[in-house]
Image (spheres, rainbow, N blue to C red):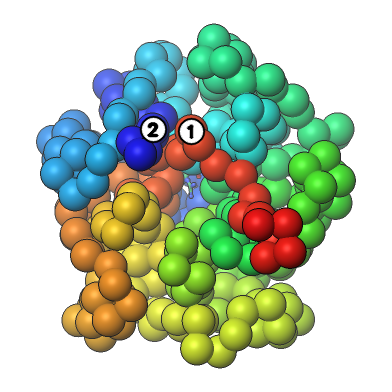
Amino acid sequence: MKTRLLMCPPTNYEVAYDINPWMTPNVGIATPEARRQWDRLVEVLQCAADVEIQCVEPRPGAPDMVFTANAALISDKLAIVSSFRHPQRRAEQRHFRSWLARGGFATAFLQQTFFEGAGDALFDRRRPLLYVGYGWRTERNAAGQIGETLGVRALPLLLVDERFYHLDTCLCPLASGHVLAFMDAFSPHSQKLLRRSIEPEYLIEVSIEDALTFACNAIEVDDALVLAGATRRLRDLLNAVGYRVFATELSDFHRAGGSAKCLTLKLEDGPALSEAAA
Ligand code: ARG
């Protein structure tokens, strides 16, 4: 089946403000390769798997709109639209909401809680579980609200390293049941929760080197993983569990703290069925 991905062309993309440590040294610095890198990402996705790219129109004054992972959390035909923590990104909310509503989704917001969509909420692909990152952007309370709304167990995970401020920068649950994780990005208690939820042979702990090249920010489509870069060790591990790995340069987006997966939103998503229900 075709995987539909929502993306936003980088027409208005720039590092215009500083809301994460990746942006700090880059505010106002040019990103001349952004368009080429974004086009190349689209090409790689189309070559690697059966994907259909849908685009939301870029709006002036919303330079981070390229990071469509932050538009919403999709579960079947419901979109829980983000409520951004930083005022700099709040204008995006209504643009994303109106695109999703026109795309046939029922849209909802969390009550008075910061929540940054599929940047901070990731469904496990095998276990009936939703991982929710909180601390820098999303608030802890989002986990309970989403869990209740979707009827899924939501596991709140405290993020403690500001370079990994969104969950999708340090965790990547795969359809094989494996989960990539950069463990030091999580509090000791959250590390325990992860180890309790994921069997050791399924937990792929990535190195700081891989984490800093955004290896956890991978787009999974069919048996392909598209990411900005991975060490030989990680590639071998992923190949061994059945994935084809495609790396594509995204350095101009790293300047704003985002990589491959941040630039996409899966339009078909939702909780894995529990074994009993399946
Ligand atoms: N500059 C953006 C921000 O700080 C980057 C967002 C990256 N998105 C993601 N899903 N990790 O919000």
Name the residue tied to disc 2: 4
Closer to the camera in the image, 145 or 182: 145
Q: Are marks 1 and 2 in contact (CB under 8 Å)?
A: yes
Q: Which callout, 1 or 2, points at the residue further toward the start of the chain?
A: 2
Asked if residue 276 lies left or right of residue 79, the reply is right
Q: Is there any visible trace of residue 207 in the rendered image?
A: yes
Callout 2 secondary element? strand
Q: Is there any visible trace of residue 13 in the rendered image?
A: no
**Residue reaching furthest to the bottom:** 200
Q: Alpha-carbon neighbours of circle 1 within 10 Å: few (<14), some, or many (≥20)?
A: many
Q: Which mark is residue 267?
A: 1
Asked if residue 250 lies left or right of residue 20, the reply is left
Q: Is mark 1 within 8 Å of ligand 1?
A: no
Q: Residue at x 86, y 32 (%)?
A: 111
Q: Residue at x 57, y 73 (%)?
A: 185
Residue 107, position as x, y percentages in the image: 69, 22
Specify the quadrant that holds the N terminus.
top left
Q: Residue at x 45, y 18 (%)?
A: 61
